[in-house]
Image: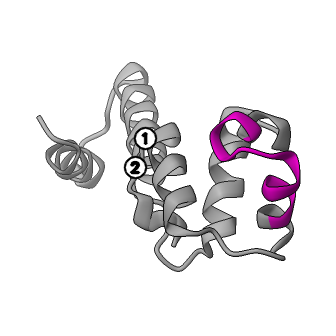
Amino acid sequence: MNHEAIADLLETLAMNEKKQRPAMERFIETLAALVMQYEAEIEPDPDSSPVGVLRFLMEERGLGQVDLVPVLGSKSYVSQILSGHRPIGAAAAKKLGEYFGVRAACFL
């Protein structure tokens, strides 16, 4: 079952006017939160800036600048990207996409 089918199922469950048992309500809430987290990680908000997407993914994983040095090559390069002084280039976007498991286009 793909994430769209799960989202449709959740919507159907949420629209059900019948009173749910507390365990089912917790299940629906938990599943909805997981779907939202999955969607945010796989396809971050398209209106976000590339640096905003990068910061979001770093925060979600508890990463700091130093954690990206092995991915991007140098501490100063990572710092320049995160401060907005340097755009994320195509090669860096590809590396970040592979590292975070998202499309490189999220960083361009």
> Magenta region's main secondary structure?
helix
Question: Can you give x and y, in whole percent of width and height, for residue 98 in the image?
Answer: 44, 42
User: Going 70% across and 34% down the picture, which residue do you hit?
Assistant: 70
Label 1–label 2 contact, CB within 8 A:
yes
| Residue linked to disc 1 | 101
Question: Mark 2 packing: few (<14 Cα in 10 Å), some, or many (20+)?
Answer: some
Question: Can you give x and y, in whole percent of width and height, for residue 13 in the image?
Answer: 23, 44
User: Going 51% across and 59% down the picture, which residue do you hit?
Assistant: 91
Q: Quadrant of the N terminus?
A: top left
Give the camera-side residue of 63 and 24.
63
Question: Can you give x and y, in whole percent of width and height, for residue 61 in the image?
Answer: 66, 34
User: Going 24% across and 43% down the picture, which residue do you hit?
Assistant: 18
Give the mark nearest the N terminus, 1 or 2. 2
User: Going 51% across and 73% down the picture, which residue do you hit?
Assistant: 108
Q: Which residues are magenta?
A: 69-80
| Residue linked to disc 2 | 42
Question: Can you give x and y, in whole percent of width and height, for residue 27 in the image?
Answer: 38, 26
Compared to residue 85, the image places residue 82 above or below, namely: above
Question: Label 1 is placed on what type of residue?
Answer: Gly
Q: CA distance from mark 1 to mark 2?
A: 7 Å
Compared to residue 73, the image places residue 27 above or below, namely: above
Give the camera-side residue of 40 and 98.
98
Give the camera-side residue of 102 and 33.
102
Q: Does 59 appear in magenta?
A: no
Q: From this viewpoint, which residue is outermost toward the top?
A: 23
Compared to residue 85, the image places residue 67 above or below, namely: above
Give the camera-side residue of 79 and 3.
79
Label 2 residue SS: helix
